[in-house]
Amino acid sequence: MNLLEIANLHVSVGDRPILRGIDLEVPSGEMHVIMGPNGSGKSTLVQTLAGSEAYTVQQGQVRFAGENLLGLKPEERAHRGLFLAFQYPVEIPGLGNALFLRTIVNAVRKTRGLPEWDALDFLSRSRAELEQMGMKPELLERAVNQGFSGGEKKRNEILQLRLLEPRLALLDETDSGLDIDALRTVAQGIESMRDAHRSFLLVTHYQRLLDHLRPDRIHVLANGQIVQSGDADLARMLEKRGYDWLLQEQRA
């Protein structure tokens, strides 16, 4: 069964069209990867799915778990199990990381009809996840992402992912700015979340992240359209040959 279904999606920023007819299906339990040249619309796609007001849907349909996703507010999408890890996680001065994490987790648990975590529940679970992600416990005591290194910010995004346990994780260049060890830790944090009911749509430029994951499908986005799809071998080919050959074939 498809968890995510996108049909003829056209998206613009102001008067400028970005996505020009996206068709994509992501079955439950699968990890799909979006690759492509800079400016092709990769981030636009995941930001639109998450409900960013910076983008305008001109036409098309998006269904998530059988429901019209485009008719939902961003917070409603999150409540139904959609999660976005940002390419550039923002700093939120004055808001403690522990308070932020516990608040968003309990908001989602409430909508699922699950009991909210008290302080002890949260600390027990978060400390276990911190250890899994190779993060220092004191990061919980600091403001959200403030003073974090690039790698710590990205790990903090995956910490949110693991605590929220979404049905669909949108990961926008989660590998950017990571050193080799942090890349491996983040990839392991993602891969260990996979199950038959959770899907991933991951944006990346590089094969290096995929070396630590098991993607089911690779999609190449160029000029606002998916121009090629394939298995993991496609990503390895792109690593060697770049995108020019593929774009030339599309123009021919």
Image (cartoon, grey):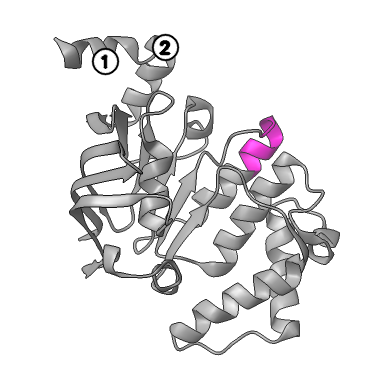
Q: Is residue 246 visible?
A: yes
Rendering coords of residue 172 (x, y %): 49, 43
Using the image as rendered, state which of residue 17 and residue 146 is in the foreground: 17
Give the Cα distance between marks 1 and 2: 12 Å
Which residue reaches farthest front? 15
Q: Which corner quadrant of the image does residue 142 belong to?
A: bottom right
At label 1, the amino acid type is: Leu
Q: Are marks 1 and 2 in contact (CB under 8 Å)?
A: no
Using the image as rendered, state which of residue 206 and residue 7 is in the foreground: 7
Q: Which corner quadrant of the image does residue 96 belong to?
A: bottom right
Residue 58's place in the image compared with 93, above or below, is above
What SS does tag 2 mark? helix
What SS does tag 1 mark? helix
Rendering coords of residue 234 (x, y %): 32, 24
Please state, as top left, top right, bottom left or bottom right, where the N terminus lies in the image: bottom left
Q: Which residue corresponds to the image point at 39% horizontal and 21% vertical from the top-left?
A: 236
Using the image as rendered, state which of residue 70 and residue 169 is in the foreground: 70
Closer to viewer: mark 1 or mark 2: 1
At label 2, the amino acid type is: Lys
Q: Read off the residue under disc 2.
A: 240
Q: Which residues are magenta?
A: 178-185
Work out whether mark 1 precedes mark 2 in sequence or the reverse, and give the earlier one. Answer: 2
Q: Which corner quadrant of the image does residue 36 belong to?
A: top left
Which residue reaches farthest left? 252
Could you classify mark 2 by the number of other residues whose Cα lies within 10 Å: few (under 14), some (14-19), or many (20 or more)? few
Give the dominant element type of the magenta stretch: helix, strand or loop.
Answer: helix
Rendering coords of residue 32 (x, y %): 34, 43
Q: Is residue 132 left or right of residue 77?
A: right
Q: Read off the residue under disc 1.
A: 246
Q: Which mark is residue 142?
A: none
Residue 70's place in the image compared with 208, above or below, is below
